[in-house]
Every structure is written in structure tokens, then in C-alpha cells.
Image (tube, rainbow, N blue to C red):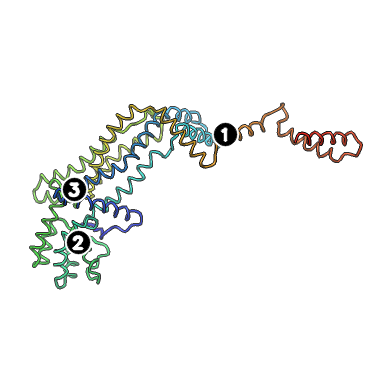
Amino acid sequence: MTDIILTQYSGKILGPIARFLGWIMNGLYVFMDNVFGIQNIGLSIIILTIVIYACLFPLTYKQQKFSKLSMKMQPELQAVQQKYKNKKDQASMQKMQEETQMIYQKYGVSPTGSCVQMLIQMPILFALYRVFYNVPAYVSSVKDIFTNAVDGIMNTSGFADTMTKFVSDNKIMVTGVDFTGSDKTVVGNYIIDTLYKMGSNGWDALKDSFSSLGDVFTTTQTNLDHVNNFLGLNIGETPWHIMKSSFAAGSYLLMIGAILIPVISYLSQVLNIKLMPTANNNGNDQMANQMKTMNMMMPLFSFVMCFTVPVGLGIYWIAGAVIRSIQQFFLNKHMEKINLDDIIAKNQEKAEKKREKMGIYQNQITNAAKMSTKANTTLSHDMTYAEKEKMIEEANAKRSGAKSGSMAAKANMVRDFNERNNK
């Protein structure tokens, strides 16, 4: 049973990303075809992967610096955690957060610095799934392969009923398909989606349904297999489907090739994680332990998912892991030579400029702190500056009501004279 993703994905978030990535992939395919005479979707996927990771490299480099700084911060962060380990009251928890934030400010980094790249990569991954699952909707050259077959089907009398029966008999699960629609472009897209997803075995059944189009279907299948073939595998099919069909046909070499996609995906992910820098937390950093668990689960997730997604997406995962591993190898060499103190100083300077732009100047903060401290400084065991000023104000109020000629009135006159001269 096969799911059909009809034409281009129309999601509000992933839809535009998928169309943009599909546009790039179509450009790469056309470029390789015109310049080198190569028509291969699998190779286009690999080149697209290189382009994507080249664009993401600045974020990767920034994340690596964050990881390096995190290692240097770990002792201080752990000291704060240990300091408030058994204190659960609100004041202590707030104090712990403040001290932790001060450490991050000291090193000029953000607590969410390591999450940015993942937040960007995940939508790209999901959007690429849409592209690889329905390549003809995004790569015009692949869609053109179906032109003669679609025209032949639509010019056949009663094709709508025949296609509906074909979909039902071959257990192709589709959503919202209506071969009887008046818009020929939409109907044509439905037919292309169906033909692209039915697999190699479906062509024989299609020839039985449209006996007069046997030669057209043979040519279409040959051209499609040519662009979709990657080391003998059809990138539009899932490894699980290829394994089952290959086992039934006795094509054991092809079955092994399908198994290798998830296996290589797993191994390449493990290699990439092994090269990633990790902090020595001695089991004390809960977040680092969670990251370690996630690093163990992600390759397993990739291994399992690769059986059920198109081979093209598996190729992307493998190519991505290999490219990241190469990047990481050279980044590790580079990070060993950089001066962390210089990076920290630059980060602090950037953070201070950012605060100044927001109108928060360091001297204002310092003066505010001094004024706050002075207001609460104790003059004696029983009186503070604030309490003294309040008493003086009360005394002045009483003196202001003194009788004319009295000692209090004369004292007020002297006070007023001094105040005028001091202005």
C-alpha cells in the first residue's frame, strides 16, 4: 500500500520551504543535464545536500564556538548548581538563575545558542521529505517524462473509471483524487503522482488497463528508471518496498543494497556524533546527560526511519552526515588553535554594545547599584540614611509652624538662608 502526496505540498510553513528547495534541486538537475549530460536525481540530491550545508556552515561554526565555550563554562555552572543543590525555595531558585545568567553573560553567549541550528535544520528536513517523496512536482524535467503517458491516458475513452479501478485494484491509497475533474492540469497531476508512486510492478498492471499504450508506458518507465536510478536503487521507493519486491523476485543483491541504506545512515550518524566535541560533565550536568541520550537515539531513529521513507531521503541523511563529519574533522583542528579568551572578550564587547543600543549603559547600572547600596547603609544599629532623612523632613515640618520670634523661628530663618546660598 502506497501513500500519495498530491502535487506540491501546500502547508503554510513547510510548503514554501519545499518549493524553494525543489526550485534549487530543479536548477541543479537542469545544470548537470545541460553541462555534463547527466540526468540523475540521486546525484542532484547529493549536490543539493552540499549546497544546504555550505549555507548552514556559519551557524555550524557558531555552534562549535558555543560548544567550546560551554566546556570552559562547565566548572562555574556546576559550582552554582552545587551551591543551590538542596535549596528549593523561590528566593534561592531565583538567585541561582541570576548567577547562572551572569556566567553566560561573562562568556558572552546565549543559553539557547546550541538550539538555533537544530531549529533551522528540522523544517528543512521535513520539507525535503516532501520534495523527495514527490519529485515530479518540483523537478520539471522529471515531470516532463510523464507527458506522453498522461496525454495517452487522458485521450483514452473512459480513462477516469479505468484509473479509479486501477488505483483500487493495486491498493494505492490516495486522498482527494478525482480523475473526473474538469481541470485537465489537476487531473494530469493526479495521474503523474499515481504513476510515480505505484512502483516498478505497477507498470505491468497499467499496461493491462491501457493495452493500447504499452509502448508509451515502456518508454516512460525506462526514462524514469534512468533518472531515479542510484546504484541500482529507485530513489522514489522505500528500502522496505525494494527489499520485499527484490526478495519475491529473487534479486538478493538489490535487497542487500536496500538494507545498506539504513545501515550506512546509522553508521554515518554515529561517526558524526563521535567527532562532535563534548564536555566532561562527570555525570553532574543533567542537560549534557540528556544530550548524550539524544545522541544515542538519533542514529537509531535514522536507522528505523530509513526503511519507511524514500531512498532519496536516506541518501540525503547519509550525504549530510558525511559532509558534517568532514566539516567537524576540520573544525576540531581549527578549534584546537583558537584563543578562547579572545573570543570571550569579543563576545562581551558585542553584548555590551547591544545593551548600549537598548539604552542600558553600564555606568547607569553601576550608579543605580551605588545609590541602592547607600540608601540601605546603616548609620547605627537603629537608623539608616533613609530613616534619618525622614526624621529631618518631619522636624522641618514642625519647625515651619513655629511662633514668630521664637528660637524655632530663628532657626528656620538660618536654615532658609543657608539653603538659598547653597543653590
Mark 3 or 1, closer to the camera: 1
For the residue labelled by badge 1, is the local secondary structure a helix, a strand or a loop?
Answer: helix
Q: Quadrant of the C terminus?
A: top right
Is 357 above or below relative to 285?
below
What label sits on residue 42 in the rendered view?
Answer: 3
Residue that numbered label 2 is attached to: 192
Residue that numbered label 1 is attached to: 363
Mark 3 vs mark 1, CA separation in Å:
59 Å
Q: Label 1 is placed on what type of residue?
A: Asn
Q: Label 3 is placed on what type of residue?
A: Gly
| Among numbered discs 3 and 1, the one appearing first in the sequence | 3
Residue 370, image x and y in percent? 62, 32
Mark 2 or 1, closer to the camera: 1
Is residue 265 or residue 275 the one in the foreground?
275
Decide: few, some or many residues near mark 2? Use Cα within 10 Å; few <14, some 14-19, many ≥20.
many
Q: Residue at x 37, y 30 (%)?
A: 279
Mark 3 vs mark 2, CA separation in Å:
20 Å
